[in-house]
Amino acid sequence: MAWLEPVTLKGTHASLEPLAPAQADELSAAVRDGELWNLWYTAIPTPEKMGAEIERRLGLYAKGSMLPWAVRSHALGRLVGMTTYMNVDQVHKRVEIGSTWYAKSAQRSPLNTECKLMLLTHAFEKLDCIAVEFRTSFFNFASRNAIARLGAKQDGILRNHQRHADGSLRDTVVFSITPAEWPAVKMHLQYQLQRPRTEAAQ
């Protein structure tokens, strides 16, 4: 994958480390913090299925459609979640930032904002992406609000886009950021990180 290769991204509050099977135990502990798999409108692995989820994401990387990371909190000193570039379009240089979850103890902190800033900076300034997308369930209001706070614009809603784990139909809300919008979004995110605040996790 000449265009999209594993890389470690480091910030003040968090680091994004290339996902690896050896992280399974630590990520299993992280997902227990808040029992995140019980959120019906998300697809977050249970602790017992964390190893399989890591293998699934690495399999998608091998096929060229995903670049996955584990998220390490500097304040907590441990892995607290996962995030990815997904639905990768290497021809047109587009990625979606998604399949993201954070342990409850890492939520309502600067961590999500900084992770998004690092991912967007890499996408626009290193990979030269023409657009970065965000997608979430219509009913995941915390995620929708967090994406809007990043400065992404809502493109629309894909109705009956896919099914939730329980079989119910999911409407997917699509947001994106373009290169022309990136300088203002970057300044906004940097400003958010410079002032005391709390935030809901995506």
Image (cartoon, rainbow, N blue to C red):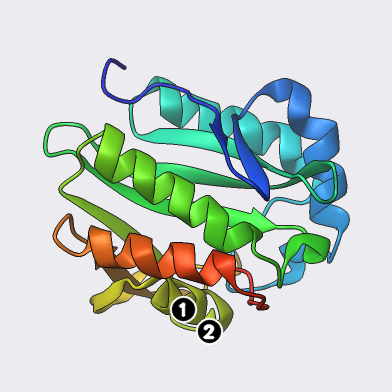
| Element carrying mark 2 | helix
Q: Which quarter of the figure has residue 194?
A: bottom right
Q: x, y percentage for residue 152?
A: 32, 71
Vertical arrangement, residue 78 with respect to residue 142, above or below: above
Could you tell me which residue is drawn at 59 percent across and 60 percent down?
112
Vertical arrangement, residue 92 with respect to residue 150, above or below: above
Could you tell me which residue is drawn at 44 percent across and 30 percent down?
60
Quarter of the picture containing the N terminus is: top left
Label 1 Cα neighbours within 10 Å, binned few <14 / some 14-19 / many ≥20: many
In the drawing, what numbered circle is on residue 141?
Answer: 2
Q: x, y percentage for residue 148?
A: 40, 78
- Asked whether, in this view, residue 152 is left or right of residue 141, the answer is left
> Do we see residue 163 in this rendering?
no
Q: x, y percentage for residue 145?
A: 49, 82
Q: Which residue, as the protein is rendered here, is positioned at the far top?
A: 2
Residue type, mark 2 in image: Phe
| Element carrying mark 1 | helix
Quarter of the picture containing the C terminus is: bottom right
Vertical arrangement, residue 181 with respect to residue 123, above or below: below
Real-space Cα distance between discs 1 and 2? 5 Å
Pointers 1 and 2 in contact (C-beta within 8 Å):
yes
Could you tell me which residue is drawn at 77 percent across and 58 percent down?
103
- Asked whether, in this view, residue 83 is left or right of residue 47, the answer is left
